[in-house]
Amino acid sequence: MANFLTGAVRTSEPTSTRFPVSIRKHYESLHAFPSGYLVIGDALCSFNPVYGQGMSVAAAEAELLRDVLRTDPHDLATEYFHGVARIIDTAWTVAIGRDLQFPEAGAKPSAQAAEFGAYLRRAYRASAVDATLGTAFLKVLNLVAEPQTLLDPALVKRVMTVPAADDLSTTGGSGHVAGH
């Protein structure tokens, strides 16, 4: 990448992008869908591009479509849309939970979502000093594991034993107070 960027020539001035809102459509809730048509990618769900999940979700949707087509399903749309809903759920939980922290979102998370969000923030900070947590957290962020996997009792214990964020700022990020 460094070699490429060294020789690259800018073709235009940088521009900013505005992404007004994440959108999810629930085609799995339809009772009927026109035969011969399907929806994929951003037409199903579009994410804030900051999280980098849109392409990953679209690729997983394409893999699911391939797998469903191989089974020669009686009702392609129903099988596909129900499978897609499960794929989207994981990324949506992570992305929307993060977005709802901002007042500009115009909505507040439920009490359960707020509690889970607080736990995820603590898990994120703890993952900086605990390799096991770091691996588990990256698997969730990279859509390899579902967010609920971070609630495994062994991981919860690790999250809760790492000092809180303000403690980490006084430890140089090591998780251990200097001199102790």
Image: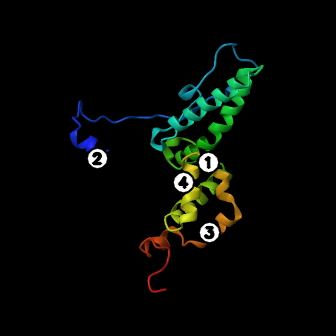
Nearer to us in this view, 20 or 172: 172
Q: Upstream in the sequence, badge 3 or badge 2?
A: 2
Q: Residues within 10 Å of mark 1 (few under 14, many from 20)?
A: some
Name the residue carrying label 4.
Answer: 138
| Quarter the N terminus occupies | top left
Q: Residues within 10 Å of mark 3 (few under 14, many from 20)?
A: some
- Locate residue 44, reporting x and y percent: 59, 28
Element at label 3:
helix
Nearer to us in this view, 62 or 104: 62
- Locate residue 5, reporting x and y percent: 26, 42
Gap between marks 1 and 2 measured at Cα = 41 Å
Gap between marks 4 and 3 measured at Cα = 16 Å
Choose mark 3 or mark 2, whichever is in front.
Answer: 2
Image: 70 above or below 137? above
Residue pictured at 73% horizontal, 25% vertical: 71
Amino acid type shown at disc 2? Ala
Q: Residues within 10 Å of mark 2 (few under 14, many from 20)?
A: few
Q: Upstream in the sequence, badge 1 or badge 2?
A: 2
Residue 109 is tagged as 1
Residue 81 appears anywhere in the view: yes
Amino acid type shown at disc 3? Arg
Amino acid type shown at disc 4? Leu
Choose mark 1 or mark 3, whichever is in front.
Answer: 3
Element at label 2:
helix
* Tag 4 near tag 3, CB within 8 Å: no
Residue 2 is tagged as 2
Nearer to us in this view, 29 or 21: 29
Amino acid type shown at disc 1? Pro
Kindly give the residue lying farthest to the top in the view shown: 35
Element at label 4:
helix
Residue 158 is tagged as 3
